[in-house]
Image (cartoon, coloured by chain):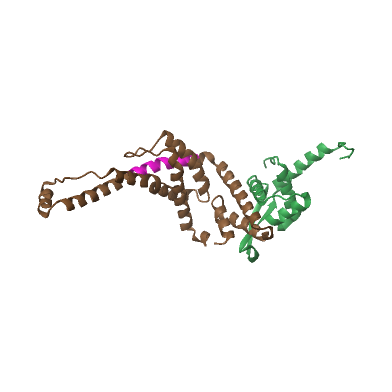
Chain colours: A brown, B green
Amino acid sequence: MRKADVAETLLSLVGSAERARSFVGDLIEEREQGRVWFWRSVTRLWLAMLGRDLLSAPLAMAICCVVAWFLYMLLSAVLALTGYVVVTLAWGIAYVLNNHTGLELFADLLRIRFNWPPIPDAATYLIQAVVLFVIAPFHIGRSSARFWRGHEVSLAVMMLVVWTGMAAFVPVVGIGITARPAMVPVMVMFVLAGALLERFRSTPAALS
Amino acid sequence: MAAAPPLGEFEQVVLLAILRVGADAYGVTIRREITECTEREPSPGALYTTLDRLEEKGLVASKYGDPTPERGGRAKRYFTVTARGGQAVARAQRAYQRLMKGLVLPGGARA
């Protein structure tokens, strides 16, 4: 990817793609100013556009982040429960197959009574961590990109602020794991990753 | 029509530069005009955010031209000053002129 395309992609994340294209076109016309000037201009405009974007509708964006937090909690609960059930079943079936002879298995099946072992704590923590910090934020990011197209970065910045507050006062309580404010940057990173994937999946030209 | 909003100094500079350049007013030409007339070079970031702000206020309008090869196939964004923008800049300039009228500046120069 050439520097102009990278610059255009970065700018299109904080404003309209058409404006980003024309701005980068202007910078290309003044290419004699040099590489440092080019990137300094892109950086300054990017920051200015991000600031304007954040201030253009801060209340609507904050409300969206609060709604996204509760959707995130719901999604986390559903995914974590599903993951827990799947792993428990897999663990139990593996245990039974490993510790029962064919006859015992048949007898247990008839009585519907298995010596079902609990899954290890480490597996519980792993499921929760992956769901809470990776999968659920990633899906929230993908969904939010459909509603806030061209505002992905400002939404992520706002989310960082709002979700830190939400994590402090309304923590996600899982089976042994709580989403602490210190973990919010990791979650928001995956929200942004999901949003960017959705953005570039729907407009592959932006990356070409 | 609502009264034209007050303008900052750089907003006035940008509006006047667009008026001076005329039909070919886009980012590069506006920046060059400002540099030539004011002897200070605005950063493209400052210029573009000001142009966006002026457009939101309804003081300038923009439209995209055709993509050109020397710009890597990217279109120019042309700006024109709206009637409201013209009124705003005229009002701001008249205010400056009234303030300056009859003044004797330090060093003896007359306004």
Evaluate whether residue B53 shows in this view: yes
Evaluate whether residue B26 shows in this view: no
Q: Nearer the viewer, residue A106 or A82?
A: A106
Q: Which residue is depicted at the point 55% across and 53% down?
A: A10
Which stretch did the figure color magenta?
A: A62-77
Which quarter of the figure has residue B23?
bottom right
Q: A99 left or right of A77?
A: left
Q: Which residue is depicted at the point 49% across and 60% down?
A: A204
Dominant secondary structure of the residues highlighted in magenta in the image: helix
Q: B30 left or right of A17?
A: right
Name the spot of residue A205 as percent of width and height, x first. 51, 61
Relative height, residue B66 to residue A44 (above, below): below
Name the spot of residue A94 as percent of width and height, x first. 21, 52
Q: B77 left or right of B111?
A: left
Name the spot of residue A61 as percent of width and height, x first. 50, 42
Q: Which residue is depicted at the point 26% across and 46% down?
A: A85
What is the count of numbered marks? 0
Q: Nearer the viewer, residue A163 or B13?
A: A163
Q: Which residue is depicted at the point 39% across and 47% down?
A: A136
Name the spot of residue B1 as percent of width and height, x first. 67, 42
